[in-house]
Amino acid sequence: MIIEKNLGKRVSLMVVKKVDFGVYLGTSEDKVLLPAKQVPEGIEVGDPVEVFLYKDSRDRMIATVREPKISLGQVKALKVLDTGKIGAFLDWGLEKDLLLPFKEQTARVKPGDECLVSLYVDKSGRLCATMKVYEKLQKDSPYKKDDKVQGIIYEISDNFGWFVAVDDIYCGLIPKREIYGNHKVGDRIEVRVTGVKPDGKLDLSLREKAFLQMDLDAERMLQDMERRGGAYPFTDKAGAELIKRETGLSRNAFKRAVGRLLKAGKIVITDTDIRLK
């Protein structure tokens, strides 16, 4: 069936029958309804109409002239409208909201969130969304080392790091060693390209080059110490986990920033803490 095979796609179909509640498109044996309120003015039998094919709330094939925010084969960021017992419902620009089942979520989403998804056809023949988009992302980006790029976090892995879709379409990863701060799936971030792998995937970092990042880290530490009353209750000899938890920095980055602040005469280190001068 040609109509069924084009579920989730935009196609051009011929008007084969006019009825009070719309027009049927396709062939006399294989046709789909375009509801009356969607029918272009002056349309006649034999005329072609470009439509998108999906299933309505009663799981019947239906055509629309409206342009959905995502079609089969695409990857797009969509807004979460609501959640229910079987998953979340996304705004994709059609009368029927798009289901994002719980099992297809890389992190739980809530109304108002933005998430990167692609479409798939489930076992019952319905269009649904999935946040598992790794295999759908492109690996032919125009970017090179040290370029600044923007993207959306679509998955977080304890083993590998944060998976980022640069420009919402290119495959990128912030390795675990480069992670700092409190970001979550759905956050949009600006990152630096640290490398391009032979297969085209992008290695990314939230941090600047070391000599630039040192000044940024030092400035953030000054602001953080002021918020804490003027001191860190530990020194640069503290363990890496404590430093990471309290400052968001790796031990090496922390020590570099401490060295910069010491040289500038802005802090003093005692046996138990680091203080503002």
Image (spheres, grey):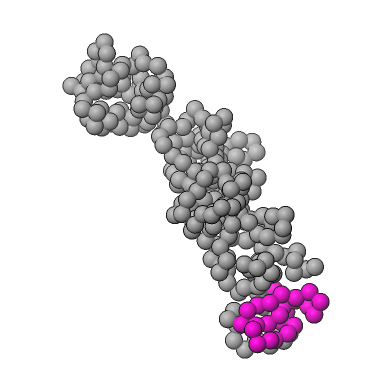
**Quadrant in which the N terminus is drawn:** bottom right
Q: Nearer the viewer, residue 95 or 48?
A: 95
Look at the image and tell me whether residue 75 can be seen. no
Percent position of residue 32, x then y:
71, 75
**Quadrant in which the C terminus is drawn:** top left
The verdict on residue 25 being magenta is yes
- Quarter of the rendering containing residue 271: top left
Task: Judge from the rendering whether residue 5 lies leftward or rightward of residue 242; answer left or right.
Answer: right
| Residue at image coords 54%, 54% | 84
Magenta region: 9-36
Q: Nearer the viewer, residue 114 or 44?
A: 114
| Residue at image coords 75%, 75% | 31
Percent position of residue 131, x then y:
58, 48
Task: Judge from the rendering whether residue 267 lies leftward or rightward of residue 175; answer left or right.
Answer: left
Task: Judge from the rendering whether residue 164 lies leftward or rightward of residue 127; answer left or right.
Answer: left
| Residue at image coords 34%, 29% | 217
- Quarter of the rendering containing residue 197: top right
